[in-house]
Each structure stands twice: as C-alpha cells, then as structure tokens.
Image (cartoon, grey):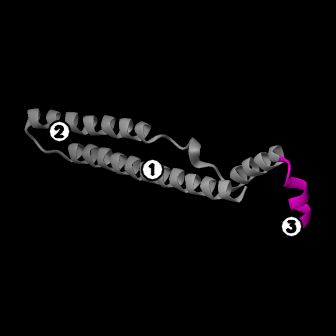
C-alpha cells in the first residue's frame, strides 16, 4: 500500500485512470435502457390491449383467441415493467458504486 501511495500521491491522471478501471471492472450500468424507453414500450402495449378490448366489444363475444391475445399482451407489459425495475435498480447500484469509488480516490 505504501508503494502504491508513493506512486499515486501526486499523479491525478493515474488516479482518474485507476478510478475508471474500477468502474469498468465492477460494471457500469449507466448504459441500461432509460426509464422513458420502457415507459414508451409499456404505453404501446397498453394501447394494443385497449384496441383488443375495443375490437372484442364490437363483436360482443368472448373467444379463447381473445383470452390468449389478452394474456400475451399482459405478460408483455409485466415483463417490460420488471425489466424497467431491474434497469433502474442497476442504475442506482452503479451510481452508489461510483459515489463510493469517488470517495476512495
């Protein structure tokens, strides 16, 4: 540790490179999809569901095909919401790690 301290004590460029390498190795989740991208896709799926319901209301009959399409859309919405949550958690984790690394360097 003393040798590392002597090498790095006056070299800010080294410290910045070291910090960036740590961030890279730990994993940087800043490239995760932005929340807005997920929200847009969720909105599209919701609109698809509303259109399906409206189409079914016009015919006035319930069919297994309707049920299957509805279930597929609902599962898609749930998967997108889960992916959005995972991406948000990853982003928060990355920001927390970056903050900790900043205090170290």
Q: Quadrant of residue 66?
A: top left
* Numbered circle sitting on residue 25: none
Q: Main secondary structure of the magenta part?
A: helix
Q: Residues within 10 Å of mark 1 (few under 14, many from 20)?
A: some
Per the image, is 68 magenta? no
5 to the left or right of 97: right
Screen quadrant of the N terminus = bottom right
Read off the magenta span.
1-11
Q: CA distance from mark 3 to mark 2?
A: 66 Å
* Closer mark to the observer between disc 3 and disc 2: 3
Q: Which residue is mark 3?
A: 1
Q: CA distance from mark 1 to mark 2?
A: 25 Å
Q: Residue at x 58, y 42 (%)?
A: 31
Q: Nearer the viewer, residue 66 or 6?
A: 6
Q: Residue at x 10, y 34 (%)?
A: 59
Residue 44 location, x and y as percent?
32, 34
Q: Which residue is mark 1?
A: 83
Q: Nearer the viewer, residue 83 or 61?
A: 83
Q: Residue at x 7, y 38 (%)?
A: 60
Residue contact at pointers 1 and 2, CB within 8 angstroms: no
Depicted 87 relative to depicted 54: above or below: below
Per the image, is 8 magenta? yes
10 to the left or right of 100: right
* Closer mark to the observer between disc 3 and disc 1: 3
* Numbered circle sitting on residue 53: 2
SS assignment at label 2: helix
């Amino acid at each position: 540790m003393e040798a590392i301290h002597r090498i790095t004590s006056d070299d800010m460029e080294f410290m910045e490179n070291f910090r960036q390498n740590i961030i890279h190795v730990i994993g940087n989740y800043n490239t995760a999809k932005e929340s807005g991208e997920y929200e847009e896709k969720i909105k599209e799926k919701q609109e698809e569901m509303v259109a399906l319901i409206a189409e079914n209301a016009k015919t006035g009959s319930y069919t297994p095909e309707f049920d299957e399409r509805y279930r597929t859309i609902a599962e898609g919405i749930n998967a997108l919401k889960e992916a959005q949550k995972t991406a948000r958690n990853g982003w928060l984790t990355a920001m927390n790690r970056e903050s900790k690394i900043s205090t170290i360097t």
